[in-house]
Image (cartoon, grey):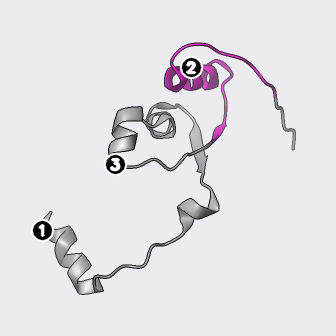
Amino acid sequence: MELLLRSHKKFGNPRQEICDFAKEWNADLILMGSRGHSGVKELVLGSISNYVVHHALCSVMVVRTPNQLAVQPSTNSSAEQLRSMIST
């Protein structure tokens, strides 16, 4: 298996530049990190990884940090969580 890695500097909208560059290079995969913003912070700052996942023409793998993967304990029972999801 051959693996080709190169580094390039691009200027402009990072969301569009990443998608365009992957298309230009006929990439098989885009591998990118995520800062883990959510809610209002993501709404204000936007999510580059979210945009790329939905607009790239190839596969995208988003790598998260271990603290982003930690499951937060819930104070609600499973039944309460299910009722909440159904009612929204």
Of residues 72 and 32, the one nearer the viewer is 72
Which mark lies nearer to you, 3 or 1?
3
At 28% across and 86% down in the image, what residue appears? 77
For the point 17% across and 77% down, the residue is: 83
Discs 2/3, front: 3
Where is residue 49? Give x, y as percent. Answer: 51, 39
| Magenta extent | 6-32
Between the C-alphas of marks 2 and 1, the distance is 40 Å
- The residue at the point 83 percent across, 32 percent down is 4
19 or 48, which lies in front?
48
Of helix, strand and loop, which one carries label 2? helix
State whether residue 87 is above or below residue 6. Answer: below
Q: In the rendered image, which quarter contains the C terminus?
A: bottom left
Residue lying farthest right?
2
In the picture of the structure, the residue carrying the numbered disc 3 is 39
Q: Are marks 2 and 3 in contact (CB under 8 Å)?
A: no
In this rendered view, identify the residue nearer to me: 30 or 15. Answer: 15
Instruction: Kindly identify which residue carries mark 1.
Output: 87
The three-letter code of the residue at mark 3 reads: Gly
Q: Which mark is residue 31?
A: none
Residue tagged 2: 17
